[in-house]
Image (cartoon, rainbow, N blue to C red):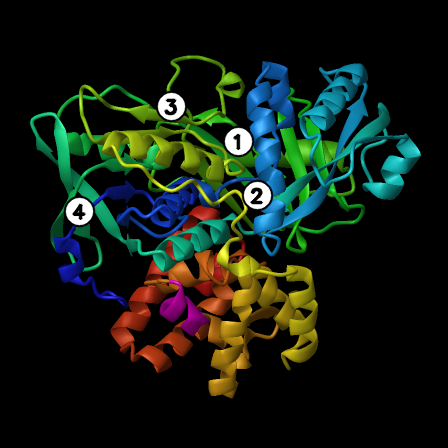
């Protein structure tokens, strides 16, 4: 049953653009299109940011390692977009110091790393962040953490950015798109393209919550299915060229440990020389990632034991005090990068540059997006809608997103807003900071709910800052349909130490009270969440069962 019933009368109009996929690229394309005056419908088979966008290493970065493959344009583009995100989403994107240690066994000698740092500084000539510095071993131990001293001769310290919850970037792009006239439907799976000879005239989709099927008319479709791009193209009903050659990236989330890094550490894995990260993240430590060819089920991706031991082994090599064992892992996550299909090419060498693929002349009115970095979503969207304008033969207004803040950023200084909100909201300091870090200036709306119902300021659990009002807000203001949407992609409580399992029943009780859920609905929500988070292999799951 839908929390937000589909208004069938809205579907009878002809859309300028149907966007298939509600991840970071799909949501950004929808926002750009709506801001430029197009009538946009977004169809997502699960929920906002429920695919690749949720499984990244949560960095907004220029891509230092891409210099090794001479992708200077991609690095420059990424660094420029990083700077824009610092301005346009300061509540979500924060500067992050990063250290690249010089180890004797590194495949890349210190001179090569230093050269890369100089190039990185040159390509980010207009940045607001500091330039790189070279640290001595003693400075490494003082400023970074208890790295393995064996073979360590120093480190390069430089700066990129972190987005704790990449999911929120997608949510705010969708919110902005809808504020400007777009319609977003989650749990709406595109099953078929409606073609007139070689021209796309519309799509057919199934509402996965009701089982009902709908058809909509459109001038153009952009397929932003991420790893599912080729699956979406099966709806054309004729053979199409394979576009996606996805690789699997997995991560571990562990508690902080003695000597844990104070900033991110970017290092070479001793086993195979792959770039890896150990990063402070939301009071925990994030370790990743792998980069493996993947041919399995796209709808259920989880880390395997070999990947888990690889990540543990490499992290323990760099931080001997960590002593990470399977029992210490809070949970894991894994996803598929929607990289271009290139046959047997080495995965690390596959470009991270996005490709906007026009299917014409074989199929007119259809564009597919291949690849794309989290950092460059805005630029990808601008390029895509520039092409859409040409395809539609429409003169659109210039792209406004370079200097347009996301909804949570507000119009003034976010940091001033945050300090005032914490001081004057009447909420616990930890709760107030959590609300502003997640929702930005939109935290004022949650405070409005609390003022109408004071018990909504209560924490769902004593050790977590999530409050009851956020559950209501997710359904009423942020288009959540399920508790899974709320915990994993709205209030972000699903990424606490318990993978949200401690919040699950209290969140269901709040929703049941305010929206009248019967016992069957409550049990369905509980079982659906437990089934979903099994892929995280969370330590707390056994107790929840």
Instruction: State how far apart marks 4 and 2 are (Cα).
Output: 31 Å
- Point out the frontmost of discs 4 and 1: 4
User: In terms of depth relative to the viewer, which is nearer, 299 or 44?
Assistant: 44
Is residue 295 left or right of 448 when viewed as pictured? left
Q: Position of residue 408 (x, y in %)?
A: 53, 60
Q: Earlier in the sequence, mark 3 or mark 1?
A: 3
From the image, tell me which residue sits under label 4: 205
Instruction: State how far apart marks 3 and 2 are (Cα).
Output: 22 Å
Q: Secondary structure at mark 2?
A: loop
Q: Residues within 10 Å of mark 2 (few under 14, many from 20)?
A: many
By secondary structure, the bulk of the magenta-drawn segment is best described as helix
- Point out the frontmost of discs 3 and 1: 3
Q: Secondary structure at mark 4?
A: strand
- Point out the frontmost of discs 3 and 4: 4
Location of residue 539 by image quarter: bottom right
Residue at position x 12%, y 51% in the image: 214
From the image, tell me which residue sits under label 2: 58
Q: Residues within 10 Å of mark 1 (few under 14, many from 20)?
A: few
Where, quadrant-wise, is the C terminus in this rendering? bottom left
Q: Secondary structure at mark 3?
A: loop
Q: Residues within 10 Å of mark 4 (few under 14, many from 20)?
A: many
Where, quadrant-wise, is the N terminus in this rendering? bottom left
Q: Earlier in the sequence, mark 4 or mark 1?
A: 4
């Amino acid at each position: 049953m839908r929390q937000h019933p589909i208004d069938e009368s809205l579907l009878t109009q002809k859309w300028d653009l149907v966007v298939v996929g509600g991840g970071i690229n799909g949501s950004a394309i929808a926002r750009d299109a709506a801001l430029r005056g197009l009538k946009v419908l977004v169809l997502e088979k699960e929920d906002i940011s429920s695919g690749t966008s949720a499984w990244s290493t949560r960095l907004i970065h220029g891509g230092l390692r891409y210099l090794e493959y001479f992708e200077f344009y991609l690095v420059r583009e990424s660094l420029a977009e990083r700077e824009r995100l610092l301005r346009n989403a300061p509540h979500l994107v924060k500067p992050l110091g990063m250290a690249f240690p010089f180890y004797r066994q590194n495949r890349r000698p210190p001179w090569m790393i230093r050269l890369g740092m100089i190039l990185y500084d040159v390509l980010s000539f207009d940045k607001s962040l500091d330039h790189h510095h070279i640290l001595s071993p003693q400075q490494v131990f003082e400023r970074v953490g208890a790295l393995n001293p064996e073979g360590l001769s120093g480190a390069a310290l430089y700066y990129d950015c972190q987005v704790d919850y990449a999911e929120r970037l997608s949510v705010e792009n969708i919110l902005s798109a809808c504020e400007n006239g777009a319609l977003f439907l989650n749990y709406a799976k595109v099953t078929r393209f409606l073609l007139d000879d070689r021209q796309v005239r519309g799509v057919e989709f199934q509402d996965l919550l009701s089982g009902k099927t709908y058809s909509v008319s459109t001038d153009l479709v952009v397929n932003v299915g991420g790893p599912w791009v080729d699956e979406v193209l099966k709806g054309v009903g004729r053979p199409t060229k394979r576009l996606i050659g996805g690789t699997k990236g997995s991560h571990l989330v562990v508690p902080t440990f003695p000597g844990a890094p104070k900033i991110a550490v970017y290092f070479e894995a001793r086993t195979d020389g792959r770039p890896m990260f150990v990063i402070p993240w939301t009071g925990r430590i994030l370790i990743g990632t792998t980069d493996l060819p993947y041919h399995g089920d796209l709808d259920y991706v989880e880390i395997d034991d070999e990947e888990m031991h690889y990540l543990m082994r490499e992290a323990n090599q760099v931080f001997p005090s960590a002593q990470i064992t399977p029992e210490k892992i809070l949970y894991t996550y894994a996803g598929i990068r929607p990289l271009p299909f290139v046959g047997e090419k080495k995965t690390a060498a596959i470009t991270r540059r996005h490709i906007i693929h026009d299917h014409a002349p074989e199929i007119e009115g259809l564009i597919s997006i291949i690849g794309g970095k989290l950092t460059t979503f805005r630029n990808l969207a601008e390029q895509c809608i520039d092409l859409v304008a040409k395809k539609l033969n429409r003169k659109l207004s210039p792209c406004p997103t370079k200097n347009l803040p996301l909804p949570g950023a507000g119009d003034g200084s976010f940091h001033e807003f945050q300090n005032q909100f914490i001081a004057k909201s009447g909420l616990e300091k930890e709760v107030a900071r959590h609300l502003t870090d997640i929702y930005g200036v939109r935290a004022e709306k949650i405070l409005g709910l609390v003022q109408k119902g004071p018990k909504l300021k209560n924490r769902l659990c004593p050790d977590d800052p999530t409050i009851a009002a956020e559950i209501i807000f997710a359904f009423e203001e942020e288009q959540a349909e399920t508790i899974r949407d709320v915990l994993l992609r709205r209030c972000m409580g699903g990424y606490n130490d318990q993978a949200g399992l401690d919040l699950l029943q209290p969140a269901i009780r709040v929703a049941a009270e305010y929206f009248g859920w019967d016992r069957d609905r409550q049990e369905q929500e509980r079982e659906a969440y437990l089934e979903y988070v099994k892929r995280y292999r969370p330590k707390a799951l056994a107790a929840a069962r």
